[in-house]
Amino acid sequence: MRAVLDANVVISAVLSPRGAPAKIFRAWLDGEFEFVASAKLVSELDRALAYPKLQARVDAQSAQALVDLIRHEAQMTPDPDGEPPVKSADPGDDYLIALGASAGAVIVSGDQHLLGLAGKIPVHSPADFLALLVDQRRTR
């Protein structure tokens, strides 16, 4: 399975090590799915981790290590040039939709704009995606 993890999921994984996003991140590191990322996604993550409210919880060295880990271990894919198959109410999310579509990957996000597109695009909340991974483990 291939998945695009929205920056909010990655950040939640760091901030709450026992939540669904952290379990998803560990599952990726354990090779249970392929994390598809792009330069735009890594840039968004890097930018978000520099926000003052996050800097108070994630030091600069840890933030850089996280960004480097994703840049080197995720399946880096070029950002798509074309329009996404469906547009989000938040135009800032459109690149994730286009990335997921071009990579044949599901999107995992806590963003209500993206989750509201379920049925039109393959998008899952962290809890739902974690349940998919658990089911996948059972069928192996």
Image (tube, rainbow, N blue to C red):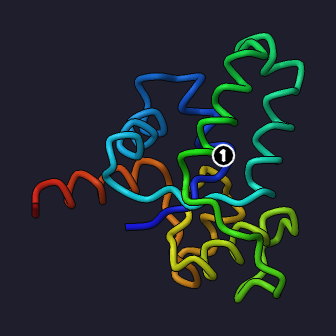
Which sits in the foreground, 9 or 103?
103
Quarter of the image containing the C terminus? bottom left
Q: Residue at x 61, y 73 (%)?
A: 100
Assess disc 1: are there few (<14), some (14-19) or many (≥20) residues with their C-alpha within 10 Å of its C-alpha.
some
Position of 72 with respect to 46 (left or right) is: left
- The location of residue 110, given as percent across then percent down, is 60, 50
Q: Amino acid at mark 1?
A: Arg
- The location of residue 10, given as percent across then percent down, is 60, 39
Position of 10 with respect to 20 (left or right) is: right
Q: For the image shown, how many numbered marks are present on the structure?
A: 1
Q: Residue at x 21, y 60 (%)?
A: 136
Q: Residue at x 53, y 46 (%)?
A: 73
Quarter of the image containing the N terminus? bottom left
Position of 42 with respect to 4 (left or right) is: right
- The location of residue 5, given as percent across then percent down, is 58, 53
Q: Is residue 57 above or below residue 105?
A: above
Q: Residue at x 43, y 30 (%)?
A: 19
Which sits in the foreground, 32 or 56?
32
- The location of residue 123, given as percent across then percent down, is 53, 68
Which sits in the foreground, 68 or 57?
68
In the picture of the structure, the residue carrying the numbered disc 1 is 71
Position of 129 with respect to 123 (left or right) is: left
Q: Secondary structure at mark 1?
A: helix
- Which residue is situated farthest in the front direction here? 72
Q: Is residue 131 above or below residue 63?
A: below
